Amino acid sequence: MFRGIARLQSQFGNILSPNKVRSPHFRFALKYSTAITERKRFYQDVSISQGEGGLYEINLDRKKLKTPGGKLFTVPNEVLAIAVATEWDAQRDTLKFYTMHLTTLCNTALDNPTQRNKEQMINAALKFLETDTVCYRVDEPHGLVELQKNEWDPVLHWIENRYNVTIGSSSSILGPEIPEATKDTFRQHLNSYNFWSLTGLEFVITQLKSVVLSMGMIDRHLSVEQAVLLSRLEEEYQIQHWGNVEWAHDYDMYELRARTAAGALFVHLSSENSTVKRKLLQDREG
């Protein structure tokens, strides 16, 4: 039943495995996933079913899954339901809720604990454009200056050409001044996303602290690994020069990759016209 979802792992990483593991609005999402960090598995079988209005439900044995807010857990399409069910099915003797990022994002979209609308979500996302990671540059050391130029400039130029906007970069503490026309263009583009996709996109932006890198990844210009590495460019530079606690560095990197990949996958699977969604259905039927 769940074999089709595995085909996405090469692009988004192994985010559905329990072994891999801001914005104030996402404190609620984190609360959902960490309030009870672990619990003994209480079910044997996981399945999905189509309910009222064509929405899909997750069944743990014969009990229907509910959100932390007490709502019936429903998702808008079959493939997202399969992905969420896979998270639950992948859990072993102990449920590790902090690894179940897709479930957490669905809970956030369903309960909408901050009661925000699309306009408020778009404004929150655009706030990150004013402090975007790739727009803030250092004056020294020379090696880091060159690294930022060589690694960040191509992505910045790509997004400016892709959306016909001007963003720029600056070493000033105030950052570059983003033209209103650029904000309007991105506002119009983000408005084309549905509420669920915006939930995922905002989550990705908060992970990478970058609209530029997030859009580059969502548009398939960057892989998850590339986007995460570019978001940590200064940290990686310092590690190369001063060393690091290896296990801690690796853990942080895998955690960020898992969260970012989950957010990107959520965006695609909750998009009404997602080519990934159609491809998964074709794979499952084939």
Image: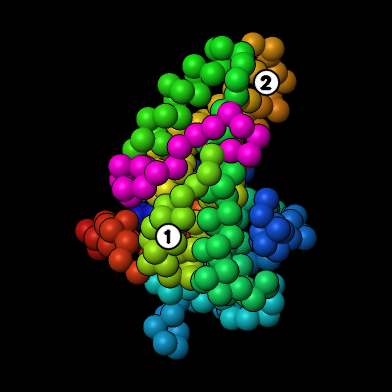
Q: Amino acid type of disc 2? A: Glu
Res. 5 in view? yes
Residue 277 lies, in percent from the top left, at: 33, 61
Residue furthest toward the bottom?
A: 52
**Residue 42 falls in which quadrant of the image?**
bottom right
Residue 118 lies, in percent from the top left, at: 51, 71
Q: For mark 1, what is the residue?
A: 184
Residue 163 is one of the magenta-drawn residues: yes
Q: Is residue 163 above or below residue 141?
A: below
Q: Is residue 236 above or below residue 253?
A: above
Residue 202 lies, in percent from the top left, at: 54, 57
| Mark 2 Cα-neighbour bin, 10 Å: few <14, some 14–19, many ≥20 | few
Question: Which SS does the magenta portion mostly show?
Answer: loop
First in sequence: mark 1 vs mark 2: 1
Q: Is residue 114 above or below residue 129?
A: below
Q: CA distance from mark 1 to mark 2?
A: 43 Å
Residue at coordinates 68% horizontally, 80% vertically from top-left?
70
Residue at coordinates 70% horizontally, 63% vertically from top-left?
28
Q: Amino acid type of disc 1? A: Asp
Q: Tell me the tag on residue 246.
A: 2
Q: Which residues are magenta?
A: 159-175
Q: How many marks?
A: 2
Q: Tell me the tag on residue 63.
A: none
Residue at coordinates 54% horizontally, 32% vertically from top-left?
170
Residue furthest toward the left?
A: 286
Q: Quadrant of the C terminus?
A: bottom left
Q: Is residue 278 left or right of residue 152?
A: left
Q: Nearer the viewer, residue 252 or 280?
A: 252
Residue 104 is one of the magenta-drawn residues: no
